[in-house]
Image (tube, helix red, strand yellow):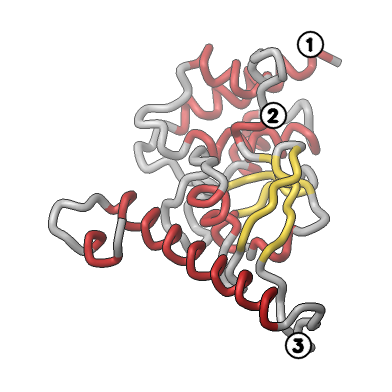
Amino acid sequence: MTMRELFEPGVSRRTFIKGIVATGVTASSMTYMFRSRGAAGAQASPGTVSRLITVSVNGQQRRVDVLPQETLAMTLRYKLGLTGTRLGCDRAECGACTVLIDGVPHYACSILTHQVRRREVTTVEGLAGSNGELHPVQQAVVDEMGFQCAFCSSGFIMAMTGMLRVNPNPTREQAARLLSGNICRCGDYTKILNSAMRAAEYTQSQV
């Protein structure tokens, strides 16, 4: 899709964003091609950031072209196709973009992709086992029907997973406090906490 087509009436927000990202990737790829031809062996200027980097996501090494100011959420969704990482507020307030970085929950909208090099990123797509078996937190959410519209679900699931690594047997009050960095715009917190407590039971049964 050309830049002119992106601005035509009727183009969806998702198509527009994916088109803009793809256009940037194409342009940067041409830059690398001409740089390699015209400046073979030349080193990057001091202080510059390499754009073609490798990130470890869900146990796989992924090579990706990243802008210096690009957030991890944008890279995961629009360049690696991991759309389970949702963009809600885009300002570290709602928690919909929560992922695990070295096992600790982080807002992917507020950390640059360049900052996660040599670190392990886990998204909701990486929780299930290789045989397709759901992670205990995912299974608990299914069993308790934990969400209404489910836009916030992946962020909550990742936050619950991080919580149970630190406190595998929280009280309901502790779970509410530990998950307070995530917002459910449907207000379905009772089911969410039911899911968290069920997930704790499933986790304990696996120990």
The residue wearing badge 2 is 171
> What is the tally of numbered marks visible in this picture?
3
| First reached walking from the N terminus: tag 3 or tag 2 | 3
Secondary structure beneath dot 1 equals helix
Disc 1 from disc 3: Cα separation: 54 Å
How many C-alpha atoms fall within 10 Å of the one at disc 3: few (<14), some, or many (≥20)?
Answer: few
Percent coordinates x, y for residue 92 in the rendering:
53, 60
Between 114 and 197, which is closer to the camera in this rendering?
A: 114
Between 84 and 5, which is closer to the camera in this rendering?
A: 5
| First reached walking from the N terminus: tag 1 or tag 2 | 2
Of circles 1 and 2, the one toward us is 1
The residue wearing badge 3 is 45
**What type is the residue that disc 1 sits on?**
Ser
Percent coordinates x, y for residue 161 in the rendering:
69, 33
The residue wearing badge 1 is 205
Of circles 1 and 3, the one toward us is 3
**What type is the residue that disc 3 sits on?**
Ser
Disc 1 from disc 2: Cα separation: 16 Å
Residue 187 occupies quadrant: top left
Image position of 44 with respect to 112: above or below: below
Secondary structure beneath dot 3 equals loop
Of circles 3 and 2, the one toward us is 3
